[in-house]
Image: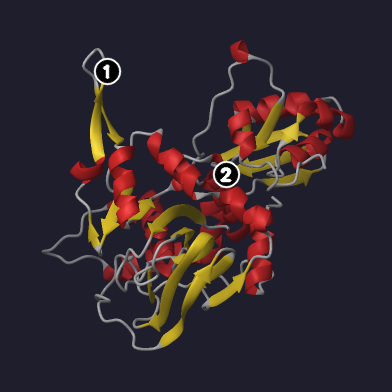
């Protein structure tokens, strides 16, 4: 998937691919104002908040370093039938923003097609799961105190300015579920300064950091944080633990009186490790991750005119003589080899208008598209979903 955000991040950070993700702090700037404004604006974020029923902790507000009680900016909207729905009170929220506050919307990719597509592009690029949180700070409001994240982050400053401080890790590759706490910040400051519109920053897991507008006066800051959770050796071992249930020896009780057969268990564990390598785990994770949510195709609502591949990771397409195999999202499809051109186009990650595609790869593209939509590897390209690609992702036919 050719997304402008990916190429801009690589250029800004001096990367060529995702190999340096998590390897070290990096910072740069995107020289593409239309990309920055096209991702998200403060008003679009507020509109997103206004039109949805949100609740803590997905949407939170902070003032002077403390979380504002939800009762101050939430209200219950009651329908004529007495149904109560919790909504953000935009008048109260506006007052907080004028005074100076920080708003946080977790998983903005769930609500906004542009953020959804950006996260999918980052997943195809990194082969890791990605979510995005949006942070809007007004006037001289403070941000979070010094903290670390249990995942790598790529931060894009979309509007205004914010002052940052980034420190080195005080514990090597700390984890959310770990053998020891990680409560003491490092004293080594790697970088401190102001992130301005278009700036990009990569902070590896475990690096301490904080951001604020304290003392900045009037103004605002909007940035998005793409959280990229990479798999670890512990993830591999947890995966092996699931597979061990296939073998009878691991399903037997451990007898306290006689003691377990440690040698037999150790040999079986070694065989399991030998049979399923870390590389096997990485491949399985990408090919077996469940499908994301998307609209179902209903022919009663209209014909299938345009589609796009929406799997979390790129599907694997393999030619086997007279057949072609597609492996993705825990599914394996077998089609005739003549479907290969259509498959490669439809599973490219870019939007596909079927009328255009027919002229390029032939009439069978419609039949293949119907199969992929039925199997939920592709989704109907609605105008709303299409807006997430417009100007950001290359049309597949192009």
Which scheme is used to colour this image of the protein?
A: secondary structure
Q: Residue at x 34, y 34 (%)?
A: 53
Left or right: 142, with 388 as reference point:
left
Measuring 26% from the left and 66% from the top, which residue is drawn there? Answer: 261
Work out which residue is located at the far front of the displayed protein and give it. 218
Q: Residues within 10 Å of mark 2 (few under 14, many from 20)?
A: many
Q: Position of residue 44 (x, y in %)?
A: 50, 43
| Label 2 sits on residue | 114
* Residue density around tag 1, few if under 14, some if 14–19, many if 20 or more, within 10 Å: few
The image quadrant that residue 35 belongs to is: bottom right
Residue 313 appears in the figure:
no
**Which picture quadrant has residue 210?**
bottom left
Quadrant containing the C terminus is top right
Q: Residue furthest bottom?
A: 188
Q: Residue at x 66, y 31 (%)?
A: 372
CA–CA distance in space, label 2 to label 1: 31 Å
- 7 above or below 52? below
Residue 13: image location, x then y, percent: 62, 72
Residue 385 lies, in percent from the top left, at 60, 34
Is label 1 in a helix, a strand or a loop?
loop
Q: Nearer the viewer, residue 164 or 112?
A: 164
- The residue mark sitting in front, 2 or 1, is 1
Q: Is residue 337 left or right of residue 141?
A: right
What x and y, as percent, mark residue 213?
38, 68
Label drawn at residue 382: none
* Secondary structure of the residue carrying numbered label 2: helix
Residue labelled with disc 1: 79
* Figure label count: 2
Q: Earlier in the sequence, mark 2 or mark 1?
A: 1
Say if residue 302 shows up in the picture: yes
């Amino acid at each position: 998937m050719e997304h402008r955000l990916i190429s801009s991040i690589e250029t800004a950070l001096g990367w060529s691919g995702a190999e340096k993700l998590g390897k070290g702090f990096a910072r740069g700037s995107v020289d593409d104002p239309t990309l920055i404004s096209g991702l998200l604006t403060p008003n679009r974020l507020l509109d997103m908040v206004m039109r949805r029923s949100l609740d803590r902790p997905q949407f939170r507000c902070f003032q002077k370093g403390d979380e504002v009680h939800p009762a101050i900016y939430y209200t219950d909207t009651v329908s004529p039938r007495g149904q109560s729905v919790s909504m953000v009170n935009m008048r109260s929220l506006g007052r907080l923003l004028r005074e100076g506050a920080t708003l946080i919307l977790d998983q903005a990719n769930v609500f906004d097609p542009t953020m959804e597509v950006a996260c999918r592009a980052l997943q195809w690029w990194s082969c890791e799961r990605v979510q995005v949180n949006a942070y809007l700070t007004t006037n001289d409001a403070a941000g979070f105190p010094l903290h670390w994240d249990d995942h790598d982050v790529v931060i894009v400053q979309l509007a205004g300015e914010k002052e940052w401080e980034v420190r080195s890790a005080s514990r090597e590759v700390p984890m959310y579920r770990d053998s020891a706490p990680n409560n003491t910040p490092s004293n080594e400051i790697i970088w401190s300064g102001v992130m301005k519109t278009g700036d990009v920053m990569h902070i590896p897991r475990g690096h301490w950091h904080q951001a604020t507008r304290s003392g900045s006066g009037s103004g605002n800051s909007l940035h998005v944080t793409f959280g990229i959770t990479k798999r670890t050796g512990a993830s591999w071992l947890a995966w092996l633990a699931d597979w061990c249930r296939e073998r009878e020896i691991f399903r037997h009780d451990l007898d306290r009186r006689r003691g377990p057969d440690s040698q037999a268990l150790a040999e079986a564990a070694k065989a399991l490790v030998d049979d399923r390598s870390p590389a096997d785990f990485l491949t399985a994770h990408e090919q077996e991750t469940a499908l994301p949510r998307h609209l179902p195709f209903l022919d009663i609502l209209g014909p299938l005119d345009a589609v796009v591949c929406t799997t979390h990771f790129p599907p694997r397409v393999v030619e086997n003589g007279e057949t072609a195999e597609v492996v993705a999202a825990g599914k394996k499809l077998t089609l005739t080899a003549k479907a290969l051109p259509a498959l490669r186009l439809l599973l490219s990650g870019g939007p596909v208008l079927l009328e255009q595609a027919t002229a390029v790869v032939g009439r069978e593209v419609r039949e293949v598209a119907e199969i992929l939509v039925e199997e939920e590897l592709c989704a109907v390209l609605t105008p709303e979903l299409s807006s997430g690609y417009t100007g950001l992702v290359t049309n597949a036919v192009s």
